[in-house]
Amino acid sequence: MRPQPDLAAAWPAADDIDFDPFSVTLRLRRASWSDGKPISAEDVRFSLDKLRDGPTGYRYRFLSGVDVLGARSMRLRFDRVVRRWWSLFSLDDMVLPAHAYSDAWDRGPTVSGGPFAFTEWTDGLRVTLRRNDRYWGPTAILRGIELLFVPDDETRLQLMDRDGLHAFFAEGDINFGRRVRARDYQVTARPLSGRREASDRWSPMWWELDLDAERLGGEVAQAVVEALDPALAVEIFEDSGRPIDVIPSSFVNERETGGEQPWSGRGDLDEAKSILERSGGRRQFQLAYPRVSGAGALATFIHFRLKELGITAELVGLEPKSFEGSWLPTKRAAGMLRLRRAGDAVDASSYATLSGQAGAGPIDELATQAETTVTTSAMEDGPVTGIDASSWLEAQRRLVDAATAAPLVRTRAWIVGNVGVTGPQPADALSGPLWNAAVWQLTRQA
């Protein structure tokens, strides 16, 4: 989780970070799009304007503007101190070419800034990529890649058996490790080595339950958080069944005298029942979740776990676009099962948004206050752009006390390869189907 410059020419120096008002100056390396046009500061400004108005705009809520200072230099302006400003560039929201972007971009990008460029896109079927010889980074080994849209992992595994696929990517699917072992794939923590292998790493993503404690009733929300033990959730979600810590790795558990405890310190049903005895809140609520990956399994786990307490969670599976819309205050369910990315965290502000935006809740004021205290103390010692562990733990304690956010389980990322495929393993900082595809090799005739 240590950020490194990529398209940026270098990490900003101390003189590039101002605190009154907070701003960061960045300079880009010399780089070109696949059509030969330079990747410019104007492209960055254009992209951030688009993203601020898009469905993930809440990530950029503290970004007040972008000043283009030159062809490859810009200043990011914020309305408050944001220690993890760089996380805006560490997610799956990427820089777009201002000169080539159109309304049809999501159905077929025409220009690329990466190691591969598009030659064909058949919606729902396949994408054909060719090597981008204008890429500023290492030249890709493969001449091209054909991406096939296959909706489920079982079908992908069957295609692998018939030599219809060379490799595929999976993240957060239930008991995936057991399934690949049953098909004689060797599970490894190393990169693919040419054998029939599945390479796994912990993903920078975790599933989390966001509760509207005000609508549900404070005591009921606290009882729900107390009852949901990540050690149990992981047994139905992961391949190993081992208890794991999510991001962040620990929080302050006031019932223990040892200080920091892993999130799996929750899960006391007797304590949850005791909390409910003081409750006047309603014990029936809707739990909305995106109809993707393992979210449904976690929602089912939550439902049956809470039934032991006399709490009924009505499960509402939504398509991704509808799920995004359900975050609006007028539509939000009392509980939301949400996939968090490490790039969204770990500032307290990642759990609190402006009123009327995704994730807004009664914790807003507490989290913002904790964050302000952190940044004010940090400024006394000079510019700080990283994570202050003790302050974050304090903010997390407030979040847990308010029963607003309950991390449940961290996911695994997998790259599964057939015989003859050598390539990378999933990475902790960024994951996806083309992670490091520039260095993949096929050692046999396709």
Image: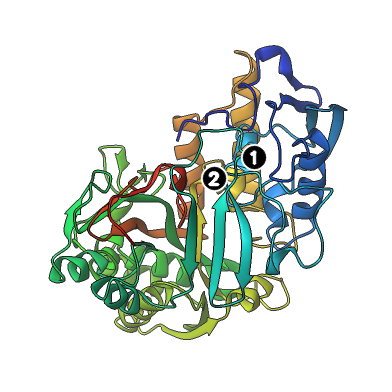
Look at mark 2 in the image and give the residue it sits on. Answer: 343
Residue type beneath disc 1: Gln
| Up-down relation of residue 76 to residue 412 (above or below) | above
Rendered location of residue 31, percent (x, y): 68, 32
The residue positioned 80% from the left and 58% from the top of the image is 53
The correct choice, above or below, for 446 with respect to 372 in the image is: below
Residue position for label 1: 369
Q: Neighbour class for label 1 at 10 Å: few (<14), some, many (≥20)?
A: some
How many marks can you see? 2
Q: Which mark identifies residue 439?
A: none
Between 332 and 343, the one lying in front of the other is 343
Residue name at image x 22 percent, y 58 percent: 419
Q: Which of 419 and 219 is in front in this view?
A: 419
Whole-Å distance between the Cαs marked 2 and 1? 21 Å
Q: Which of marks 2 and 1 is in front?
A: 2
Asked which secondary structure carries label 2, the reply is: helix
Q: What's under tag 2, amino acid-wise?
A: Gly
Which of the two residues, 194 or 352, is positioned nearer the viewer here?
A: 194
Q: In which quarter of the image is residue 417?
A: bottom left
